[in-house]
């Protein structure tokens, strides 16, 4: 077995920003074959953000122009309710479609990465398997690659958040330009807080992945040791 430095997972090391960009580009290469699913999912997320902006605006229009002015007849109220309900149903369907397609693309990407990793393991020499614990290899193939799916999920939430932020700002700007510009001034502060959070959380997350790799390594070695102990016990004294 190698020493602790050799058996440490890459999660225990700090990744420079330049290397993070390179890793992101490599991930995009695996996502590219499923760009249709991802593209439709992103477009669906954009439509949901637009509907989230239009529904309150439509309700405001109904309240200001009909209900408050007491011009709302039964027919107008029914039509307003039907339109609002239809918009809610369309939003729910779009949410289901884009979440399903995005999850489908993420799982296919994960499958592609694991296949390449499996073929890579078969091309490695015996020295690698002699120096690297089996539990650590299993952790890298299963748990560490699973973080790719988590990353794509976070990326989806970021895209949705950006769309929601843009549409909310547009709606606020149409309603009150001064208030929208005041809110815009806080975006740099929000970006700075987000940057600090990513720096702190990524360090903790890498430590968590490293500890998980060590647990799998110890568990695998313990299980393998059980059969060896049983074999010694079965020997004749």
Image (spheres, helix red, strand yellow):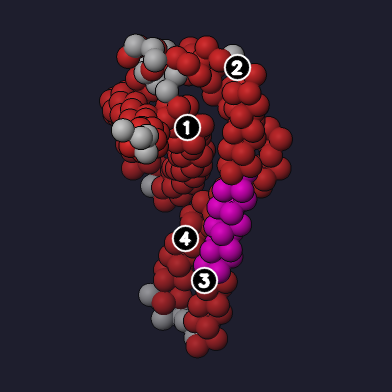
| Residue 149 at x, y percent in the picture | 51, 39
Between disc 4 and disc 2, the foreground one is: 2
**Residue 58 pos. (x, y %):** 49, 65
Q: How far is disc 3 from disc 2 in space, using C-alphas?
A: 60 Å
Residue sticking out furthest to the front: 237
Q: Mark 2 and 1 residues: CB-CB less than 8 Å, in contact? A: no
| Residue, disc 4 | 57
Name which residue lies at 50% across and 77% down: 81
Q: Nearer the viewer, residue 225 or 75?
A: 225
- For label 1, count other residues whose C-alpha is less than 10 Å away and answer few (under 14), some (14-19) or many (20+): some
Q: Secondary structure at mark 4?
A: helix
Q: Is residue 100 magenta?
A: yes
The earlier-in-sequence mark between 4 and 1 is 4
Task: Indicate which disc, 2 or 1, sits on the residue closer to the N terminus.
Answer: 2
**Considering only order in the chain, which callout, 2 or 3, is on the residue closer to the N terminus?**
3
Q: Nearer the viewer, mark 1 or mark 3?
A: 1
Residue that badge 3 annotates: 84
As helix, strand or loop, the secondary structure at mark 2 comes to loop
Residue 66 vertical position relative to residue 177 in the rendered view, above or below: below
Q: Which residues are magenta?
A: 87-105
User: Closer to the camera: disc 4 or disc 1?
Assistant: 1
Tell me which secondary structure the magenta stretch mostly adopts. helix
State the residue position of label 2: 124
Q: Is residue 185 magenta?
A: no
130, 12: nearer the viewer: 130
Residue under pointer 1? 138
């Amino acid at each position: 077995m190698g020493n602790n430095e050799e058996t440490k997972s890459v999660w225990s090391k700090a990744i420079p920003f330049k290397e993070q960009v390179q890793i992101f580009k490599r991930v995009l290469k695996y996502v590219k074959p499923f760009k249709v699913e991802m593209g439709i999912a992103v477009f669906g997320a954009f439509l949901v953000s637009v509907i989230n902006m239009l529904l309150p605006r439509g309700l405001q229009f109904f309240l200001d122009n009909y209900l408050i002015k007491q011009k709302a007849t039964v027919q107008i109220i029914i039509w307003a309710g039907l339109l609002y309900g239809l918009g809610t149903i369309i939003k729910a369907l779009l949410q289901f479609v884009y979440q399903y397609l995005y999850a489908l693309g993420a799982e296919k990407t994960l499958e592609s990465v694991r296949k390449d990793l499996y073929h890579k393991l078969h091309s490695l020499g015996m020295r690698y398997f002699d120096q690297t614990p089996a539990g650590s290899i299993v952790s890298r193939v299963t748990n560490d690659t699973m973080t790719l799916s988590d990353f794509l999920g976070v990326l989806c939430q970021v895209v949705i958040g950006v769309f929601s932020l843009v549409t909310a700002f547009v709606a606020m700007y149409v309603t009150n330009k001064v208030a929208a510009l005041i809110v815009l001034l806080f975006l740099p502060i929000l970006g700075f807080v987000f940057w600090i959070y990513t720096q702190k959380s990524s360090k903790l997350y890498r430590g968590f992945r490293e500890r998980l790799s060590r647990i799998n390594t110890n568990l695998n070695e313990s299980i393998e040791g059980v059969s060896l102990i049983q074999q010694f016990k079965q020997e004749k004294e």
